[in-house]
Amino acid sequence: MLKTLAKSIRQYKRESILSPVLVTLEVLLECMIPLYMSTMLKDITDEPTMSNILIYGAILLVMAAFSLLFGILAGKYAATASAGFARNLRHDIYYKIQDFSFANIDKFSTSSLVTRMTTDVTNIQMAYMMIVRVAFRSPVMMIVSLAMTYSINWQMGVIFTILVPILGAGLFIIFKKVDPIFNKVFKKYDALNESVQENIKGIRVVKSYVREDYEIDKFDKAAENVRADFTRGEKIIALNNPLMQFCMWTAITMICFVGSMIVMQSAEEALNRSDLMILIVYAAQTLSSLTMLSMIMVMISIAKTSADRVVEVLKEESTLTDPENPVYEVPNGDVEFDGVDFKYSEKADRRALKEIDLKVKSGQTIGILGGTGSSKTSLVNLIPRLYDVSKGSVKVGGIDVRDYDIEALRNQVAVVLQKNVLFSGTIKENLRWGNPDATDEELVRVCKLAQADEFIQGFPDKYDTYIEQGGSNVSGGQKQRLCIARALLKKPKILILDDSTSAVDTKTDALIRKAFREEIPDTTKFIIAQRVSSVEDADQIVIMDNGTIAAVGTHDELLAHNKIYQEVYYSQNKVGATAQTLIEQRKEDGNGKA
């Protein structure tokens, strides 16, 4: 875990090293000051001159000033190192997520990834700042103070040596108990963030169904779960302070008692009164360093859980990788499914796709119909290699998609998914996701093909109109057309429309398909649709049923022989359904003439 996290320090190694070095110098000076004061008191007592006092005072002032300077610089470098480390960590997580396949993304929820990049990274940042500064300060101060104590009187040093392991054992037990609690807390944080995310994203639905009270109650329960677990953890951690206070005052009491006995019995030969006062100072320093160390342990205990969650993302390897010698050129838009089986997870019992065989020639239009859950989307997701097949192969341009460079393949396969996503920015900026170098003329051309230019021209700012996050200020149909235009800008060899015209009227749908036939005849087009009218003029129509291809044919062929297609067609065309009913009735009456 530490090795993985350390990779994110990078350019902040200098600050990460300087901070503990400066802290060490600060602590050495702090520990030398009491010893120096002891020497000063003896000398001033023996020779109480003003020059003596001024010299010792000046030296003390210089030592204190350098200690302060080292402390300030250590704090500055610690803050720079921790903030930079957190920045790099967020950068690494974000870039790692960008490389994830759909299978990797399915493993982590959106809310969980957001929590890991915000709350978890913040916890790690705070712990790192404590480690590079306070975590070095506390052990160094404890070791030096103990060394100074032994140099003054070994009997006093034994007191510390006995108490420190007792305190350490108590801290270990406390943090052993609290670690599993924080593991649960952050999982509940994910649920809390998910509740917030869902509520804000679906606020229109919440208000239309008057479910505000229900959502508030759901959020309160999630927040209460987080509070309850945090309270349990904090109650256990709270034992740390009384344990520290007990050990501190026990040590000081024993030093005062044992030290006083030594002073009286040895007539200040083994230990004098000024040394006793210095020992009390070292006792306070040693035990205060342990107090700080215990605070660090609290922070580290929380951060450890966060670090485990962050490292889980950083260590996650994409299920899709490029081959050693990838193919960078896609010859054409031919697509072939050869004995394809597919499961979303290796552990899954059910196959999403079973025994798929399909050949599509470049430039053809393929319609795909099927009921909900028939795996239409799963089928087309395999073409740009958003997932890998479990068995068989998918070929594009006669080459297995697993032999291509992933970026090169996806640049030639444009996909308009079921959930159309627009990003905050102007219409131009959204369209140029398809081609960052596209000219304004190209933007207008693809928007005309997608039947989007007309409504864009109706906006006051036209193509410079600002799109709100998620495209909330445009209608569903307008959003779909903008997404189609964006896909066309890629000039792909294969275009996949996953139910991407469901929100447009039939006339606009027909105009879009007409533009496709006339303007991009060499592009292979896969159109998943719910309306028969959207695919009836396709070269081939694929009927999906429970993860298998039930039939393939033209509109006329399927209407004549396929029951699934007939049911869909007649349910969407009432006139046709009535005519079909009359034909069947006449056949039953023995009159085959319609």
Image (cartoon, grey):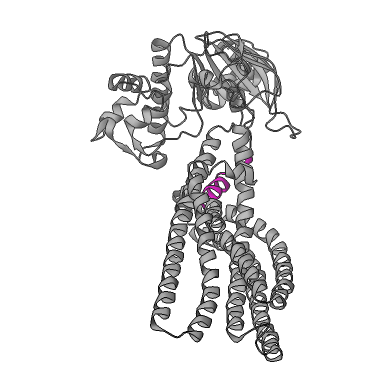
The answer to which image quadrant residue 225 occupies is bottom right
The answer to which image quadrant residue 70 occupies is bottom left
Whether residue 345 sits left or right of residue 463 in the image: it is right
Vertical arrangement, residue 344 with respect to residue 68, above or below: above
The answer to which image quadrant residue 169 occupies is bottom right
Q: Does residue 110 show up magenta in the picture?
A: yes
From the top left corner, tell me how far across and down residue 325 is, in percent. Answer: 60, 14
From the top left corner, tell me how far across and down residue 296 is, in percent. Answer: 59, 62
Which residue is nearer to you in this view: 574 or 27? 27
Whether residue 396 sits left or right of residue 467 in the image: it is right
Q: Which residue is drawn at 39% across and 78% down?
A: 54
Q: What stretch is highlighted in magenta?
A: 107-118
From the top left corner, tell me how far across and down residue 439 is, in percent. Answer: 30, 21
The quarter of the picture where the C terminus appears is top right
Which residue is nearer to you in this view: 493 or 19? 19
Q: Main secondary structure of the magenta part?
A: helix
From the top left corner, tell me how far across and down residue 410 is, in percent. Answer: 52, 21
